[in-house]
Amino acid sequence: MPIKEIKRRALQRQEEEIGRVEKELERLRKRHEELKQSLFDTSKRLQGSPDSSLLVEETEELKREIAAIVVEIRENDIRLSRLKKKVKK
C-alpha cells in the first residue's frame, strides 16, 4: 500500500473521530443544560421547604453530575482541538 493511501486513510479516520467527538460534546452539553435546569428547579423547591434532607441530597447529586459532565466536556474539547490540529497539518 502506498504511503499516500496510508496517509489518506489515517486522515479519514481522524475526521471520523472528530465527528464522533463533536456528537459526544453535543450530547454532553445537552445533558449539562438539562441538569442545570433540574438543579435550578430543585433549588427552588428547597427554598420552599428548607428542612427537607431529601431535596438537599438531590441537589448535591445534581451538582456532582454537573461537575463530572463539565470535566468530560473539557476533556473532549481538548481532544477535539488536538484532532483538528492534526488534521490541518
Image: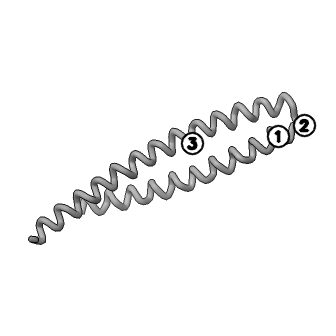
Q: Label 3 sits on what residue type?
A: His
Position of 6 relative to 49 (above/below): below
| Residue found at x 79% / y 45% | 57
Position of 44 relative to 71 (above/below): above
Q: Are marks 3 and 2 in contact (CB under 8 Å)?
A: no
Q: Are marks 2 and 1 in contact (CB under 8 Å)?
A: no
The percent position of residue 17, horizontal first and vertical second, equals: 33, 55
Residue bearing mark 1: 54
Position of 46 relative to 84 (above/below): above
Chain-order first, disc 3 or disc 2: 3
Q: CA distance from mark 2 to mark 1?
A: 9 Å
Q: Is residue 34 left or right of residue 81?
A: right
Q: CA distance from mark 3 to mark 2?
A: 27 Å
> Which mark's residue is nearer the viewer, 2 or 1?
1
Chain-order first, disc 1 or disc 3: 3
Q: Quadrant of the C terminus?
A: bottom left
| Residue found at x 62% / y 39% | 35
